[in-house]
Amino acid sequence: MPVVLLIVVGALAGVLATRLMRVNADLPTAMVIGVLGAVIGGMGFRFLATSASWVGVFVLALLGSLALIWVWQMWQRRR
């Protein structure tokens, strides 16, 4: 169950993150960014707390997605 929750919340966070950062990405790309961001945020959250609510997971997934988009944009500018 936690994996399914991570995927769903991560996908939603990715869509929101791409809209907040004004990235023109299609829905599957935004969802993948969100799931990867959720993994990044989830690892960070494990260092900060031992239990999580869905709100905490969503916020950290959103922050992880935003960080991943930022790194991706920096990498694209260098190319």
Image (cartoon, helix red, strand yellow):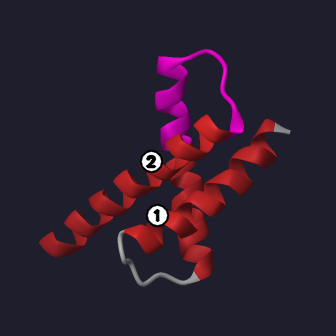
Main secondary structure type of the part rendered in magenta: helix
Instruction: Answer yes or no: is residue 53 visible.
Output: yes
The part of the chain drawn in magenta is: 39-54
Nearer mark to the viewer, of 2 and 1: 1
Q: Residue at x 48, y 19 (%)?
A: 47
Q: Earlier in the sequence, mark 2 or mark 1?
A: 1
User: Is residue 79 visible from the viewing direction of this image?
Assistant: no
In the rendered structure, which amino acid carries the disc numbered 1? Ala
How far is mark 2 from mark 1, CA to CA? 9 Å
Q: Is 55 or 1 nearer to us in this picture? A: 55
Compared with residue 48, is residue 64 higher up or lower down, i.e. above or below? Answer: below
Amino acid identity at mark 2: Gly
The circle drawn on residue 4 is: none
Q: Quarter of the image holding residue 3?
A: top right
Magenta stretch contains residue 22:
no
Whole-percent x and y of residue 53? Answer: 69, 31
Badge 1 is on which residue? 17
